[in-house]
Image (cartoon, rainbow, N blue to C red):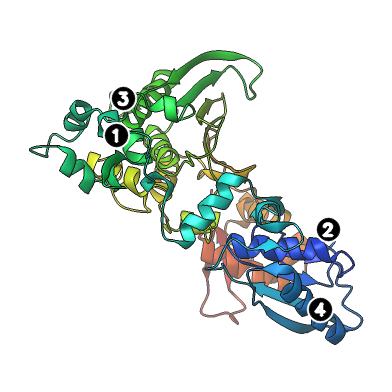
Amino acid sequence: MLQRDEGKTLEFKRDLSSPDKVLHTLIAFANTAGGVLVIGVENRTKHVRGVSDPLPEEERLASLITDRIEPRLVPNIEIIAWRSAQVIVVEIYPSSTRPHWLKNLGPDNGVFVRIGSTNRRADEPLIHEMRRMARNETYDESPLAHLDSEALDFRVAAELFPQRRTLDRAALETLRALTRHERRLVPTVGGLLLFGKELEREFPDAWIQCGRFAGTDKSVLADSVECHGILSKTLDAAYDFVKKHAVYPAKISDLKRMDAPSIPLRAVRELLVNAVVHADYAQQGAPVRVSLFSDRVEIENPGVLLAGLTVEDIKHGVSKLRNRVIGRAFKELGYIEQWGSGIQRAMSECREAGLPEPTFQEMAFRFRAIISLKAEQPPERDVITEAVRTALLAPKNRKGLSTHQLAERAGISPRAMRTRMAKLVDSGLVSVLGKNARDPQRKYHWKGV
């Protein structure tokens, strides 16, 4: 744990002198993706101070958790020895009874979640989302009881799903675009977002804001567009905006001129679909945003990762649907190929384009994907490797050099050089000629670039 930095699932505390902050962290871990709290370590320097009286402090912490957190939270608490010190380690798992809250603040003001390496007080939409998840419900399945089925545009729905012979009320009910509520057939949130006639009357922020900026910040706006309408229409319009601003430099391949965009469009498409499908449409004043800069593309949607998920999880294909109705419809429409694969495909497309993999950030209840447009540079060689390279490429050393000769030139011990050369051989930068590791005639040759 000391090798890692504080983040979504790890925090260090010097001591228990501020119990409220400790409880905020434990609540945030339980409400989000779980985590480990280490008490007795300074958070900035990672200096292990230890806990002077670990057993009484462990008992005190257990009492604080029992007395001040609701619903009941049962963590795993251990005392771990580190050299001459002892620290308290508290492990929290993602809770199935979330949201948890601090009793003295109540269920509306005492709920905390983990955003990056900080604890944030959850707002009302996020609290409702956690309660829905505990009931295995999603927001876009919620009925809009004050509307009737005529709020949906059946003609648009039929055009979007031409493979279905008829798309009547029964079919839309199967898609969960319509649902029964008090013996009436009413649209769901997802149904209105997908096929609504006047969806922005109910969801004024369900649109996509696109901007092209002249530099690396938002000081100079060169072009912009607001994409309004049903979700599939806004998605297509936003993607067209990105295509419009993709620069197509000429490339020569097999004596033929080829044009390729400087922006990896397939990666943009995957991340844009992901943003629309996983957006939290309960949030107000927060449309999906697409920002094009000279060095990157940013795609941002309202809503952090669902409880139990981390950035590393989604990069490995782990996925949870925030909006089941929208997700199912987009899969039938061909926007989604396979659940959980969009992020991985975007990463692959960037690698194939010679760009770094996209990075992902959670911030202030929003989620951002960033595609860098700067070509990935090969890692710089360290001083020792560069000394080896220089020595082996010298014309007078064409017959190769031994471990001892390389150690003299690099200024390190033969033993250290032997370890370094083994790594360079494994990496393919260096070849070695000799009968075995103890052969006195064993010589190294540089073959890397």
Q: Mark 4 against mark 1, which lies toward the viewer?
A: 1
Visible in this render: residue 58? Answer: yes
Picture residue at 42% right of the left edge, 25% below the top: 200
Q: Nearer the viewer, mark 2 or mark 4?
A: 4
| Image height of 86 relative to 428, above or below | below
Label 2: state its secondary structure. loop
Label 4 with label 1: CB-CB less than 8 Å: no
Q: Is residue 158 left or right of residue 148?
A: left
The image quadrant of residue 335 is: top left
State the residue lying farthest toward the left: 165
Q: Is residue 335 left or right of residue 36?
A: left
State the CA–CA distance, disc 3 to disc 1: 12 Å
Instruction: Nearest to the eye among marks 3 and 4: give it.
Output: 3
User: Distance of mark 4 from mark 1, alpha carbons?
Assistant: 60 Å
SS at badge 3? loop
**Which amino acid is tagged 3?**
Lys
Q: Nearer the viewer, mark 2 or mark 3?
A: 3
Where is mark 4, residue-wise? 87
Q: Tell me what residue is drawn at x 51 percent, y 29 percent.
A: 289
Please tell me which residue is depicted at 85% across the width and 61% down the height of the picture: 45
**Residue assigned mark 1:** 148
- Where is 57 relative to 26, above or below? below
Residue 2 in sight from this viewpoint: no
Residue under pointer 3: 197
